[in-house]
Image (tube, coloured by chain):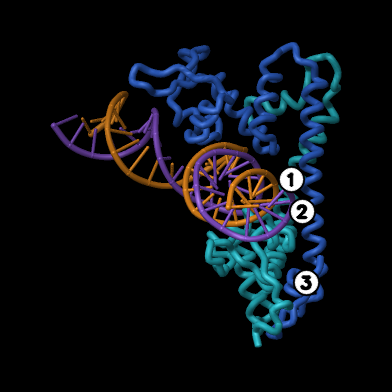
Chain colours: A cyan, B blue, C purple, D orange
Amino acid sequence: MKASIAAAEKSMNIGGAAKASGVSAKMIRHYEAIGLVPKVRRTDSGYRTYDANDVHSLSFIRRSRVLGFSMKEIKKLLNLWRNKTRPSSEVKKLALEHIRDLEKKISELQAMVDALRILALKCNGDDRPECPILGKLGEIKD
Amino acid sequence: MKASIAAAEKSMNIGGAAKASGVSAKMIRHYEAIGLVPKVRRTDSGYRTYDANDVHSLSFIRRSRVLGFSMKEIKKLLNLWRNKTRPSSEVKKLALEHIRDLEKKISELQAMVDALRILALKCNGDDRPECPILGKLGEIKD
DNA sequence: ATCCACCTTCCTACGATGGGAAGGTAAAGC
DNA sequence: GCTTTACCTTCCCATCGTAGGAAGGTGGAT
């Protein structure tokens, strides 16, 4: 039975899985080492073997990374993803928390930009040494 | 009450410099190790000794970090700061480049937020398992 | 003399990724 | 067959900025 549908489940080495998932072979091994993905089968000679499902998980991880989720968050997302009876509220909660973190980071960076813009505007940017940017950075008091 | 020896350069140990500059003792040693600040004098017993100028440099570094400059950028800023004949154009150039980097990062983060917001809006967030967030992350194609 | 706060150096870790060495293996060409 | 080439394996190191801790020495006050 299994042999008759062998063509459907074509398996591949780590390089193939890397190309197919967009995750580098290096990182695939790393994800396995930290337990983010389970240990896959090996050939007699020790090569890792991946099937379409494994690649699917790796793609899931890659897309989660693109959205800025951390490994720890992705671990939770993967569990929810694999759990067909999860409540969507849990997923939404994770996403909203992540959005909050991202927005906090954004406002911190924006504050830096704003402060620098003000200083840069007041800086002539010519051959003279006077510069409010250095002035501000070197101020004795805060 | 420092009137009696007002102009005296009161020196301190690394702990005092840390408090005065807002940079941890740990990081002061690190900055010295990577050559960001010069090696300071030592007492006979090997304790590092800091004066007001040293503390001033450390405060400069801390304020630069607050504005998000990297160690490499701070190294350049310190050189410009100490060089009384620098052209302000160089400082401004560094600042503008840094602003560009920050804004690039901000827009990347903002793109993540936007994508997540759209998905989260479409997620019921109730007891049912259906969730477009996981759906999107698990999509077969990109 | 004792105590405690401080100092020293050295090692470890984080989080996510990449580089590279040293060596084994698969599959192709000749 | 034998060689080449491309791939695989594990293991160690580097990044960047910061922090924690161990083991041991020093300074000043009690």
Residue type marked 3: Glu
The answer to whether the residues at label 2 and label 1 have Cβ atoms under 8 Å apart is yes
Chain for disc number 3: B
Residue type marked 2: Leu
Q: Position of residue A141 (x, y in %)?
A: 63, 28
Task: Name the side, left or right, on which B45 lies relative to B88.
Answer: left
- Within 10 Å of the Cα at label 2, are there few (<14), some (14-19), or many (20+) other Cα atoms? some
* Point 79% across, 51% down: residue: B108
* Point 64% across, 75% down: residue: A80
Q: List the residue tagged with mark 1.
A: A109
Whether residue B26 is visible to the viewer of this picture, yes or no, is yes
What secondary structure is found at the residue carrying circle 1? helix
Q: Nearer the viewer, residue D18 or B11?
A: D18
The answer to whether the residues at label 3 and label 1 have Cβ atoms under 8 Å apart is no
Q: Position of residue A134 (x, y in %)?
A: 72, 24
Mark 3 or 1, closer to the camera: 3
| Residue B139, disc | 3
Whether residue A101 is visible to the viewer of this picture, yes or no, is no
Q: Nearer the viewer, residue D23 or B67?
A: D23
- The image shows residue B75, relative to residue C23, as above or below, that is above
* Point 74% across, 63% down: residue: A20
Residue type marked 1: Leu
Quarter location, residue A126: top right
Chain for disc number 1: A
- The image shows residue B47, relative to residue A71, as above or below, that is above
- For the C terminus of chain A, the image quarter is top right
What is the spatial separation of the Cα atoms under label 2 and label 1, in whole angstroms?
A: 10 Å
